[in-house]
Amino acid sequence: MRLKKVSSWARNLKRDVVALWIASRDRRTPLAAKLVAGAVAAYALSPIDLIPDVIPVLGQLDDLLIVPLGIMLALRLIPAPLMREFREAALLRSRPRSPIAAAAVIGIWTLGAAVLAMIWLKQEP
């Protein structure tokens, strides 16, 4: 029984990510909701995680916390009738890819590595 609930939750989560991607591109979506929906969808659809899954616990926590919490926030900002429409449209679409989000994550990691390198190099022996 629990496996069915988890499976249903995961299916709905995937559908909602695609629905948020659609919402972020729809002119009827309020601006704040567009920004949140676009960020959540881009992060969830990016092939590269902000925190790689190979890092124990933290790598899984970002997928288990950031995406669902982002979806919950976006759902509060998008009017319910619009969200129903976006969910229906999401059922008819394949999962989009987000190369821009992948590039953004790579940029964040590169910037972080550069900052750490600068801090490390400035330390006196």
Image (spheres, grey):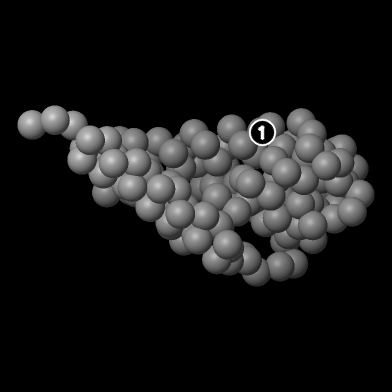
Q: At which x and y percent is residue 72?
A: 66, 33
Q: In the displayed image of the protein, which residue is found farthest to the left?
A: 125
Q: At which x and y percent is residue 33?
A: 78, 40
Query: For this view, does 31 lie left or right of residue 67?
Result: right
Who's the residue at 86% across and 41% down the image?
Answer: 30
Q: How many marks?
A: 1
Who's the residue at 63% across and 66% down the image?
Answer: 96
Residue 121 shows in the view: yes
Who's the residue at 65% across and 39% down the image?
Answer: 71
User: Residue 94 lies in what quarter of the image?
Assistant: bottom right
Q: Identify the amino acid type marked 1.
A: Met
Q: Along the line of sight, which residue is nearer the eye, 19 or 45?
A: 45
Query: For this view, does 70 lie left or right of residue 24?
Result: left
Q: At which x and y percent is residue 123?
A: 18, 32
Mark 1 Cα shell of 10 Å, populated few (<14), some (14-19), many (≥20): few
Q: At which x and y percent is residue 28?
A: 91, 49
Local SS, label 1: helix
Who's the residue at 14% across and 30% down the image?
Answer: 124
Residue 5 shows in the view: no
Query: For this view, does 85 lie left or right of residue 12?
Result: right
Vertical position of residue 2 compared to residue 98: above or below: above
The residue that mark 1 highlights is 72
**Image quarter in which the C terminus is found:** top left
